Image: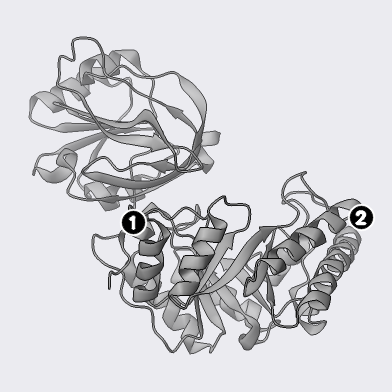
Amino acid sequence: MAARTAFLAAIMLASAAFAAPRPVGVVAHPDFSREQIRKVLGKDVTFFAETDLAAIRAFSAKGGRIVVAYCGNEELGQFMGVKPGKWGKLDCRALGLGGKIHCSYRTGCAFVPSIPRGNPLHARVTATIFDSSLRNTGLAGAIETDRGVWYAHAVPPSPMKEGTLSRLPGAIRMRGVWTAGHSLDPGGWRAMADKLAATGFNTVFIKSDCPEFDVAMNECRRTGLSVHAWMVVFGSTRRMPDRPKDVESAAAEALRLVAKGVDGIQFDYIRYPLGSGGNHALAAARMQTVSAALKKISSAVRAKSKTVVLSAAVYPVPRTQQSVGQNAPEWLRLRLVDFVSPMCYTESDAEFGEWLAENAAAIPASKMVVGIGSGANESRLDEAAVKRQLDAVYGRKLRGAAFFALDAELASRLRSK
């Protein structure tokens, strides 16, 4: 179900819901990982089903605080002093700043709660939901009451710790970050660019269709950051690699970005959709089709500029790359791109190392900028995990690494001058 694939990652900044040394009981959908919840709330958390009302009341009566997530049970809501919302689809990108809670949140569904009439248990909204453009919707993402806290979606299970991200090691040649283009700083892109530079980043991949693209590019350039346009090529059914008009459209878009004076262009979704399936023969044919499309786009850019750096975001390892029509070794051999970025988003050090080894067997180290999942749906890394993955990148002498992505959580951890 949608709850299984939705993801919430958060930093708990001394939230009043969990600051007091009181036992915590959790009511959460079974798809949410109890292990991850325990990472935030402690190993002694007690879990309840939403129908365990008698046990929940008894637990609360003994001083326990109740945490409810992704729930529409009206009787439980009445006990908690919250009016549960109905399940619904939601264009949700972030659980916003609420004084004490700072979350980075991605999901397509939620039970959005509200404060009931009379407010018998002093309910207060501690976080609101932002949409995919990071506009505050005003909808409650979290409500705290005298008996605990009620979340619209998941309990925030993030291993990220409070504090500033260490300065990135200068020994790694390219130190990048992807951004949807929103500054996520009250000081706008001027302040954000300063913080990225102060943290040691030297490259920013900015979503090419973002309204703030020009502002972001200029401010990043001011601080010495290299700017690469992050361009979606064949996303969903918007464009397909086997449609000549779509390839021409993509080439035209790339040329418009060249005209803006970008340092590079990274082609994302340069592939067939995930799950399109097929046998080995079909996979081989699709690789040829995608490579031919990339060649036309790349040739158009190369004819216009000899200095713009071209790259492509690809699936984590060669076998999954090929399943969607990506042939990274051939692209590099033919110089259709200058480097590739395998999206190695995992919280497992062992898996990350295995993926690097698989890529290194097919891709030159000097042409690999590995994607690190600092804020991906698949992984949310704390500072120690980030350092371990960067050490692995340096150990293999790769061209660099890029963080996915510049979200509210990562922005809060950047250094200031």
The label shown at residue 187 is: 1
Q: Left of 240 or right of it: where is 222?
A: left
| Residue drawn at point x = 48 percent, y = 63 percent | 373
Q: CA distance from mark 1 to mark 2?
A: 43 Å
**Which of marks 2 and 1 precedes in the sequence?**
1
Which quadrant of the view contains residue 391? Answer: bottom left
Q: Quadrant of the C terminus?
A: bottom left
Structural crowding at the residue carrying mark 1, measured as other residues with C-alpha within 10 Å and reported as few (<14), some (14–19) or many (≥20): few
Residue nearest the observer in this picture, 84 or 130: 130
Q: Secondary structure at mark 2?
A: helix
| Residue drawn at point x = 76 percent, y = 61 percent | 323
> Looking at the image, is 51 positioned above or below residue 36?
above
Q: Secondary structure at mark 1?
A: loop
Position of residue 25 measured from the top left corner of the image (x, y, whole percent):
22, 34
Q: Left of 314 or right of it: where is 153?
A: left
Position of residue 386 measured from the top left corner of the image (x, y, whole percent):
39, 71
> Looking at the image, is 328 positioned above or below residue 180?
below
Structural crowding at the residue carrying mark 2, measured as other residues with C-alpha within 10 Å and reported as few (<14), some (14–19) or many (≥20): few
Number of the front mark, 1 or 2: 1
Q: How is the image coloured?
A: one colour
> Looking at the image, is 140 positioned above or below residue 409?
above
| Residue drawn at point x = 34 percent, y = 34 percent | 128
Residue 178 visible in the picture? no
Three-letter amino acid code at disc 1? Gly
Residue holding disc 2: 244
Which quadrant of the view contains residue 168? Answer: bottom left
Residue 205 visible in the picture? yes
Q: Quadrant of the N terminus?
A: top right
Tally of numbered tags: 2
Three-letter amino acid code at disc 2? Pro
Residue nearest the observer in this picture, 138 or 374: 138
